[in-house]
Image: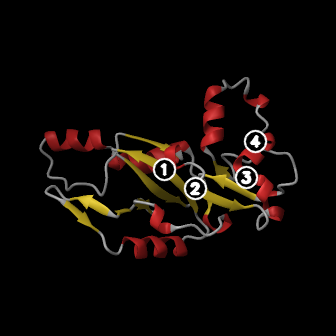
């Protein structure tokens, strides 16, 4: 099953930082610890695989008009993995070895992300740079301190719905407008 998660970080969400935040929720590690006899409660969620964006890529809309002066969109310079996260650029850079990355001019791909409308459809960036988005579209949110909340969670016996999940999500996003957000496709 796939779940859309919003992950909040104080600094730009690099792969290493995302991995660090996701580590406590690794399902294999959790069940190995359980098999060793630990009396650890079930985590809010577990994963066996995840990636930035994935099947939920391009969820956020980065407002280019609002950030024109801040990021100088009129100039041809790279911004992926500095200003925003994008599944497209992650895949392109993954396919190129270090010697060929210079062949990818991000600026040429911006129209594929929607820049003709002065909006870039991205997988992450500063919350304050994003246009309003539907918070009910996520199943899990992980705050900047690594605390996870889910719409429903397994307690060992049954699924328990969190009826205040949308309110928690709204509060977290409002309190962290100057932090980064990234969409993570979580598989479990």
Q: Residue furthest right?
A: 75
Among the two numbered marks 4 and 3 on one chain, the one whose residue lies closer to the N terminus: 4
Q: Can you identify the residue that label 1 sits on?
A: 184
The residue lying at 82 percent from left, 62 percent from top is 68
Residues 40 and 149: in front is 149
Q: CA distance from mark 1 to mark 2?
A: 10 Å
Q: Earlier in the sequence, mark 3 or mark 1?
A: 3
Q: Secondary structure at mark 3?
A: loop
For the residues carrying marks 4 and 3, which lies nearer the camera in this image? 3
> Gap between marks 2 and 3, in whole Å?
12 Å
Q: Which mark is residue 109?
A: 4
Front residue of 14 and 165: 165
Q: Residue at x 69, y 46 (%)?
A: 80
Quadrant of the rendering where the N terminus is positioned: top left
| x and y, in percent, of residue 90 in the image | 61, 38
Q: Secondary structure at mark 1?
A: strand
Q: Quadrant of residue 140?
A: bottom left
Helix, strand or loop for disc 4:
helix
Disc 3 designates what residue?
114
Instruction: Name the residue at 31% across, 48% down.
Output: 46
- Between disc 1 and disc 2, the foreground one is 2
4 lies left or right of 9: left
Label 2, on which residue? 59
Q: Are marks 3 and 1 in contact (CB under 8 Å)?
A: no
Q: Is 77 rendered above or below residue 175?
A: above
In the picture, the quarter occupied by the C terminus is: top left
Picture layout, residue 80 above or below residue 182: above
Q: Quadrant of residue 166?
A: bottom left
């Amino acid at each position: 099953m796939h779940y859309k998660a919003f992950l909040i970080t104080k600094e730009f969400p690099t792969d290493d930082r995302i991995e660090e935040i996701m580590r406590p929720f690794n399902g294999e590690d959790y069940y190995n610890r359980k098999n060793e006899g630990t009396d650890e409660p079930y985590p809010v969620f577990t994963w066996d695989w995840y990636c930035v964006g994935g099947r939920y890529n391009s969820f956020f809309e980065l407002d280019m008009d609002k950030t024109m002066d801040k990021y100088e969109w009129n100039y041809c310079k790279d911004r992926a993995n500095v200003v925003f996260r994008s599944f497209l650029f992650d895949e392109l850079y993954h396919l190129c070895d270090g010697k060929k990355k210079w062949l990818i001019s991000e600026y040429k791909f911006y129209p594929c992300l929607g820049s003709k409308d002065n909006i870039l459809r991205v997988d992450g960036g500063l919350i304050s740079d994003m246009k309003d988005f539907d918070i009910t579209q996520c199943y899990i949110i992980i705050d900047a301190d690594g605390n996870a909340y889910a719409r429903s969670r397994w307690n060992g016996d049954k699924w328990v719905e969190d009826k205040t999940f949308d309110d928690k999500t709204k509060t977290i996003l409002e309190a962290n407008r100057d932090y980064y957000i990234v969409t993570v496709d979580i598989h479990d």
